[in-house]
Amino acid sequence: MQCSVDNCEREATYKAAQLCQMHYFRVRRNGTVVKTPIGRALRYVTPNGYITLYKPGHPLSNKTNCVFEHRFVMWPIVGPDCRPCELCSKPQTWATCHVDHIDDNRQNNSPTNLRILCRGCNVKRGFRPESHEFRSKVGLIEFEGKRDTSTNWARDPRVKVSGNTIRLRKAAGMTDAEALFSEKVTHNGRRKAPAPRKTNHKHERSNAVAITIEGVTMSAAEWSRTDGVVVTENTIINRVRSGWDPVEALITPGRQRPIADEAIKATYRAKTRELKKGQAA
C-alpha cells in the first residue's frame, strides 16, 4: 500500500492511517501532513497550559521565534510602549509586565479576558488566605469579621506588633484579639548590664610590648607606623626583648647591628618630642 499523500511514493507503514512514517509523525506532531517551518508546530500548548505561536521576527518572540499567544494578542492593543498596571497604575514595559487571564483560563486569550498587571499585583491576585490554614499551625486570625494571615494583620495600622509576634501569641494560647492588640512587651529593662572588659589597656596587657621614648608610650605596632621607623612590628618586639635601646630598635634597618651614631639618635629623639607635643595638642 502506498502513502495516501499526494506525490508521496513511500510505502504506507501505518496501514490504518494510510500514511508513511514521515507523514504519520508529521500529523502526530503538527496536526497536518504539511511541513511547517523548521519542522515545528505553528501553535503549541506548553506543559503549564499556555499557548505559544511561531512568529519569527515578532518584537515579543524569544530566541526560538515563539511568542505567547496572550502577549501576541495584547501587543497591537497596547502598543510597543505598554501601559501601566491596571490595578496599581505602576508604569510597565513589555519586559516587566504580566498579561493576566481574568477568568484563570490560560487558553482563553480573548482581548476582553486579558489585562496588563505588574508582577506584584499578578502574584497577589491569586492569593487565597484560606490556603495558609493548611501551612500554618495557628491558622488565620479573625477580628471584626475579617479573616487574614498574621503577616497581613501586621500591616494594619492598628496593629503594633509583627506577624511573628502574632503567631507566637496564638501558639501560646492568646485569643485573636489579644494576639493583635495586646501591649507590646520588651525585655530591655530586665537585661543585665554588660560585664566590664577583662582586657586591660593595650599597653598593659601581659603580652604587650610598650616602648617609651621621651615620655611617649606606644605599642610596637603603633611605633612601626610612625615616620622614620624602617622595621616591622615583630622586628621591634624581638629587638626590645633582646635588650636593644628603644631608639636603636626603631631606626636601625633590618639585618644590621645597632647604630652607634649619637647624632641619628638625637634626631629621632627630637622627632619623638614633636610627636609628644602633637599628642598633647
Image: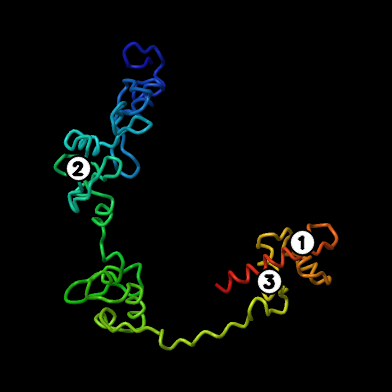
Label 2, secondary structure: give it. loop
- Crowd rating for badge 1 (residues with CA inside 10 Å; few <14, some 14–19, many 20+): some
Vertical comparison of 70 with 55: above or below: below
Using the rendered view, name the quadrant where residue 36 is placed.
top left
Discs 2, 3 touching: Cβ within 8 Å = no
Using the rendered view, name the quadrant where residue 10 is placed.
top left
Q: CA distance from mark 1 to mark 2?
A: 79 Å
Residue 204 in percent (x, y) is at 68, 80
Residue 221 in percent (x, y) is at 68, 66
Q: Earlier in the sequence, mark 1 or mark 2?
A: 2
Res 219 label: 3
Mark 1 belongs to which amino acid?
Answer: Ile
Vertical comparison of 220 with 60: above or below: below
Q: Which residue is mark 2?
A: 83
Discs 3, 1 touching: Cβ within 8 Å = no
Total tally of numbered discs in the picture: 3
Mark 3 belongs to which amino acid?
Answer: Ser
Residue 125 in percent (x, y) is at 23, 55
- The label nearer to you, 3 versus 1, is 1
Q: CA distance from mark 2 to mark 3?
A: 67 Å
Considering every residue shown, the one lying at the far left of the view is 112
Q: Which residue is mark 1?
A: 264
Mark 2 belongs to which amino acid?
Answer: Arg
Label 1, secondary structure: give it. helix
Q: Earlier in the sequence, mark 2 or mark 3?
A: 2
- Crowd rating for badge 2 (residues with CA inside 10 Å; few <14, some 14–19, many 20+): some
State the quadrant of the C terminus.
Answer: bottom right
